[in-house]
Image (cartoon, rainbow, N blue to C red):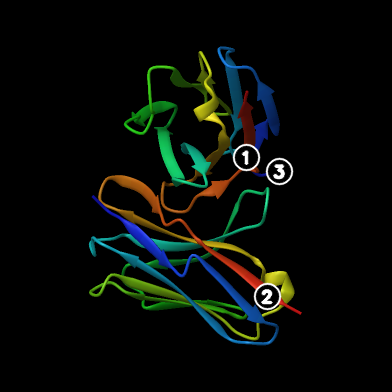
């Protein structure tokens, strides 16, 4: 059974700092991995999707990497801004099961 | 496109009452998913449909929960009778091919 873990559960950084969020998964036979953003009281917004054949995806200040063999993904946020404050969730699609989510990392960027 | 639409956005009800949550997926999406999110358990898949047919309902917690998708543009999640431990945010998501999901804003359910 696929399990997804995100560390740390919460992170607070000063504005302008570069940061890395971590995601690990137990079954490396995945189709893809997605990073989502969730603002308080809102739904999830897809940020990046990495196919199993890819090693990274970039969108603006965000870069997501995937290492299938070690069961790890990272989300790198460059030059963080207060508007980046949100919960970031990692989700993995594998086998015949739909997305399995981690519990998220709650990020606070302090001005 | 308006995205995934869920109603109501907030629901407060008393224990024992029936609750119906509604979802309109993005037009053309063949997959529809129902999730429940709590602080303790995070985001959990309850059930998903492909072309209006339930594929996997193993996440439905009890017989008190039921879901239907009578057509491609509408789905309901019903809880009868509701209990305080059902309090959570319920999300609906749709997907064109099952790989990338688009989430609705959620329904916050409080059962007193």
Q: Nearer the viewer, mark 2 or mark 1?
A: 2
Judge if badges 1 and 3 mark residues of a common chain. yes
Circle 2 residues within 10 Å: few <14, some 14–19, many ≥20: some
Whether the residues at callouts 1 and 3 have beta carbons within 8 Å, the answer is: no
Q: Indicate the chain on which mark 1 is placed.
A: B
Distance between the alpha carbons at the discs numbered 1 and 3: 15 Å
Q: Please, is residue A84 above or below residue B37 in the view?
A: below
Which percent across, then down, holds residue A89? Answer: 50, 60
**Image side of residue A2 versus residue A56, left or right:** left
> Which of the 4 image quadrants contains residue A13?
bottom right
**Image side of residue A47 versus residue B56, left or right:** right
Q: Secondary structure at mark 2?
A: strand
**Quarter of the image where the C terminus of chain A is located:** bottom right
Which numbered disc covers residue B106? Answer: 1
Q: Please, is residue B112 above or below residue B104 in the view?
A: above
Tell me which residue sits at (71%, 77%) in the image.
A110
Which percent across, then down, holds residue A26? Answer: 25, 62
Distance between the alpha carbons at the discs numbered 2 and 3: 30 Å
Which numbered disc covers residue A109? Answer: 2
The answer to whether residue B8 is seen in the rendering is: no
Residue at the far right in the pictured view? A111
Which numbered disc covers residue B2? Answer: 3
Judge if badges 2 and 1 mark residues of a common chain. no
Circle 3 residues within 10 Å: few <14, some 14–19, many ≥20: few
Which percent across, then down, holds residue A75? Answer: 49, 75
**Image side of residue A96 versus residue B88, left or right:** left
């Amino acid at each position: 059974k696929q399990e997804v873990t995100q560390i740390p559960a919460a992170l607070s950084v000063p504005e302008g700092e570069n940061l890395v969020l971590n995601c690990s998964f137990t079954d490396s036979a995945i189709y893809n991995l997605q990073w989502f953003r969730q603002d308080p009281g809102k739904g999830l917004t897809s940020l990046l999707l990495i196919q199993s054949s890819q090693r990274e995806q970039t969108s603006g200040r965000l870069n997501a990497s995937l290492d299938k063999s070690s069961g790890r993904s990272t989300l790198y946020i460059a030059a963080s801004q207060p508007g980046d404050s949100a919960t970031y969730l990692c989700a993995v699609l594998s086998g015949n099961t739909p997305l399995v989510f981690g519990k998220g990392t709650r990020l606070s960027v302090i001005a | 496109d308006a995205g995934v639409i869920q109603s109501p956005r907030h629901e407060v009800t008393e224990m024992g009452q029936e609750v119906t949550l509604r979802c309109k997926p993005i037009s053309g999406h063949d997959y529809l998913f129902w999730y429940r999110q709590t602080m303790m358990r995070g985001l959990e898949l309850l059930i998903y449909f492909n072309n209006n047919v339930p594929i996997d309902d193993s996440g439905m917690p009890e017989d008190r929960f039921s879901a239907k998708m009578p057509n491609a543009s509408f789905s309901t999640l019903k809880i009868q009778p509701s209990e305080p431990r059902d309090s959570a945010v319920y999300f609906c998501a749709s997907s064109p091919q099952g790989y990338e999901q688009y989430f609705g804003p959620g329904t916050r359910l409080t059962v007193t």
